[in-house]
Image (cartoon, rainbow, N blue to C red):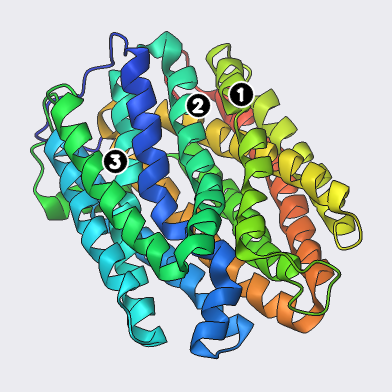
């Protein structure tokens, strides 16, 4: 196990967390991260408004994802040092300002810059997830993290539904103004209702960041899950970036839905993601290997159905349900594994994992935009299936290496 602190008070392992607080953390994770994705079903609207190409428009998805990766790298490690009861609401207030500036953007360049800032402060979601883990008792940690992560992914998916409905009333800019106001209200609620935070690390900021690299170097399981997370989010981002173009009929497809209807398709994905707490219970029972293997199989099956969706609306709905269940199961199995590595450094473990995870999101959205413009929806599905096949192949290799390491470890030594 990596030693990450030289002058730190070890974080409590947790004695239990109320259901109400778990629900608040799930809501906070979902709302804060949804700011990155609320414009995804409105890409066609934005493209028309600014008179730009679909590949250029997809940068509205890429910019906040890049910002999110930066926020994960520079802000989330501070969750091991600062009072999270104050830190998280401050990040939400900054997000509210960035959303408002996005809404008043007179041109596409300003929208990109403001969207980047939205992504930076949306890293609040990954302050909340390890926070909930630290408050949970060990026997319930998988379920608690699963519930909060379900809130996060459902927030991503419902962002498309709600933004589509709001945009139908007043356009894509109104979506950003509403999100800004909601962020302010949530910041006040979190500060007013969460418990006082526990003892924090005393490491200077620079050493805190360097300790992230130490964790990555010394924890093989963390490196393995980072690679799997990259591929998971690559596929997720590729699918949801281009499905808006598919449903709008951008390349002459049979679908010609409005932004409101396009947003409603997020309900199918949210329904699939809601099954994640069941995966958390598997992890709590020591079946994390089964959970990971099953997740990748489900993702591949989801892509098969999505590949038919160019001609079948039913296949699209089934594909969204199955695909997002697999994505959330993969994410949860990864995070359950890494949170067992360093109880006193969960924010920094989160940083290492989630930076790679959302770099996968950036790569997925960029490749998706290019693939859709070059070959349409089937090209997007092709790169998605390829990423999933690589993912399950790597998992087989990693599982073999981890089992072999565990088998040769000296008695009493904890291995990753």
Q: Secondary structure at mark 3?
A: helix
Q: CA distance from mark 3 to mark 2?
A: 15 Å
Q: Secondary structure at mark 2?
A: helix
Please state if 155 lies on the left or on the right of 315 as rendered. Answer: left
Residue holding disc 3: 127
- Asked whether the residues under the numbered discs 2 and 1 touch, taking CB atoms below 8 Å apart as contact, a structural biologist would say yes
Residue 352, numbered circle: none
Please state if 291 lies on the left or on the right of 160 as rendered. Answer: right
Answer with mark 2 or mark 1, whichever residue precedes in sequence: 2
Answer with mark 3 or mark 2, whichever residue precedes in sequence: 3
- Residue 382: in sight, yes or no? yes
283 vs 164, nearest the viewer: 164
Q: Position of residue 107 (x, y in %)?
A: 37, 87
* Residue at left offset 79%, top offset 75%: 376
Quarter of the image holding residue 5?
A: top left
Q: Position of residue 208 (x, y in %)?
A: 19, 48
Residue holding disc 2: 146
* Residue at left offset 56%, top offset 50%: 161
Q: Position of residue 178 (x, y in %)?
A: 34, 55
Q: Secondary structure at mark 1?
A: helix
Q: CA distance from mark 1 to mark 3?
A: 22 Å
Q: Position of residue 395 (x, y in %)?
A: 68, 41
Farthest residue, direction bottom: 51
Residue holding disc 1: 279
Answer with mark 1 or mark 3, whichever residue precedes in sequence: 3
208 vs 312, nearest the viewer: 312
389 vs 172, nearest the viewer: 172
| Mark 2 neighbour class, 10 Å CA radius: few under 14, some 14 to 19, many 20 or more | many
| Mark 1 neighbour class, 10 Å CA radius: few under 14, some 14 to 19, many 20 or more | many
Q: Is residue 305 above or below residue 244?
A: above
- Asked whether the residues under the numbered discs 3 and 2 touch, taking CB atoms below 8 Å apart as contact, a structural biologist would say no
């Amino acid at each position: 196990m990596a030693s990450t602190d030289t002058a730190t008070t070890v974080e409590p392992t947790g004695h239990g967390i109320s259901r109400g607080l778990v629900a608040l953390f799930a809501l906070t994770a979902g709302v804060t991260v949804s700011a990155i994705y609320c414009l995804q079903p409105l890409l066609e609207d934005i493209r028309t408004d600014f008179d730009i190409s679909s590949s250029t428009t997809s940068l509205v998805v890429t910019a906040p994802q890049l910002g999110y990766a930066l926020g994960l790298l520079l802000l989330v490690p501070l969750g091991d040092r600062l009072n999270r009861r104050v830190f998280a609401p401050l990040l939400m207030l900054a997000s509210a300002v960035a959303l408002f500036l996005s809404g008043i953007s007179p041109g596409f360049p300003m929208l990109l810059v403001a969207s980047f800032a939205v992504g930076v402060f949306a890293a609040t979601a990954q302050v909340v997830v390890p926070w909930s883990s630290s408050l949970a008792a060990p026997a319930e940690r998988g379920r608690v993290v699963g519930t909060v992560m379900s809130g996060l992914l459902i927030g991503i998916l419902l962002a498309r539904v709600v933004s589509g409905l709001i945009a139908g009333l007043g356009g894509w800019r109104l979506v950003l103004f509403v999100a800004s106001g909601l962020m302010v209200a949530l910041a006040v609620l979190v500060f007013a209702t969460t418990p006082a935070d526990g003892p924090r690390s005393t490491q200077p900021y620079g050493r805190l960041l360097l300790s992230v690299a130490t964790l990555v170097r010394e924890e093989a399981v963390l490196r393995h899950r980072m690679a799997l997370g990259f591929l998971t989010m690559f596929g997720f981002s590729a699918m949801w970036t281009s499905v808006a173009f598919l449903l709008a009929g951008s390349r002459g497809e049979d679908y010609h839905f409005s932004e409101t209807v396009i947003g409603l398709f997020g309900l199918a994905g949210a329904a699939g993601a809601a099954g994640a707490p069941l995966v958390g219970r598997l992890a709590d029972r020591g079946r994390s290997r089964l959970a990971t293997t099953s997740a990748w199989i489900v993702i591949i099956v989801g892509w098969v159905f999505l590949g038919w969706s160019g001609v079948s609306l039913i296949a699209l709905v089934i594909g969204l349900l199955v695909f997002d269940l697999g994505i959330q199961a993969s994410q949860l199995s990864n995070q359950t594994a890494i949170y067992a590595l360093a109880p006193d450094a969960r924010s920094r473990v989160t940083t290492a994992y989630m930076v790679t995870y959302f770099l996968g999101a950036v790569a997925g959205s960029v490749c998706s935009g290019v693939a859709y413009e070059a070959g349409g929806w089937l090209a997007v599905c092709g790169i998605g299936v390829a990423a999933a096949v690589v993912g399950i192949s790597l998992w087989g290799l990693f599982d073999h290496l981890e089992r072999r390491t565990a088998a040769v470890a000296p008695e009493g030594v904890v291995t990753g």
